[in-house]
């Protein structure tokens, strides 16, 4: 039942598309992904659903990642790279925060019972 619930997101997009009311998974004139997209990615023994925005074939803006009917991650992309704060959840509970600058992870925090229990600053080595 849970997989069916998330599949309704994809099913709704397909129905809207077939009726000419598609607001998801559009291409621009250059055949690049544009605007809001719903994508499926295999992950271990299941499928993750990613809802994100594209501009001229590049992810830009908010993104949310779902496993079955639960959000497991959310954050932003800028020019195709993760940017700013990304939050990760297990069973609806925040367990990790990661900070990105131009796609490079600069910090992560592990969270238990709403409190940071571990904080690591990452210095990129180029």
Image: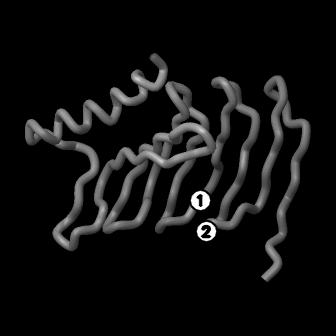
Q: Residue at 51%, 58% (x, y): give it.
A: 77
Give yes or no for contact between labels 2 and 1 (Cβ–Cβ under 8 Å): yes
At a point 60% along the width and 39% down the height, the residue shown is: 45
Q: Position of residue 69 (x, y in %)?
A: 50, 25
Which residue lies most toward the front here? 45
Residue 3: x percent and y percent? 46, 25
Which quarter of the image is occupied by the C terminus? bottom right
Q: Which mark is residue 34?
A: none
- Quadrant of the snapshot with the N terminus: top left
On the image, numbered disc 2 is attached to which residue? 102
Q: Earlier in the sequence, mark 2 or mark 1?
A: 1
| x and y percentages locating residue 7 in the rendered image | 38, 30
| Callout 1 crowding tier (Cα within 10 Å): few <14, some 14–19, many ≥20 | many
Q: Position of residue 90 (x, y in %)?
A: 69, 30
Find numbered disc 2 in the image and state the secondary structure of the residue it sits on.
loop
Q: CA distance from mark 2 to mark 1?
A: 6 Å
Residue sitting at the far bottom: 126
Residue 13: name its quadrant. top left
SS of the residue under disc 1: strand
Furthest-top residue in view? 1
Residue 106 in the figure: left or right of residue 37: right
Colour scheme in the image?
one colour
Q: From the viewer's perspective, is 115 left or right of 38? A: right
Which residue is at 23% across, 54% downward?
26
Crowding at dot 2, Cα within 10 Å, few <14 / some 14-19 / many 20+, comes out as some
Q: Is residue 29 depicted above or below 61 in this figure?
A: below
Q: Which residue is mark 1?
A: 83
């Amino acid at each position: 039942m849970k997989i069916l619930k998330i599949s309704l997101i994809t099913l709704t997009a397909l129905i809207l598309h077939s009726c000419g009311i598609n607001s998801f998974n559009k291409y621009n004139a250059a055949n690049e992904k544009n605007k809001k997209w719903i994508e499926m990615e295999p992950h271990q023994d299941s499928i993750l659903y990613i809802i994100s925005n594209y501009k001229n074939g590049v992810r830009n803006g908010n993104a949310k990642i779902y496993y079955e009917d639960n959000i497991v991650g959310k954050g932003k992309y800028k020019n195709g790279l993760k940017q700013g704060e990304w939050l990760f959840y297990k069973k609806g509970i925040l367990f990790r925060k990661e900070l990105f600058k131009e796609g490079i992870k600069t910090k992560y925090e592990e969270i238990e019972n709403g409190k940071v229990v571990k904080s690591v600053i990452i210095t990129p080595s180029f």
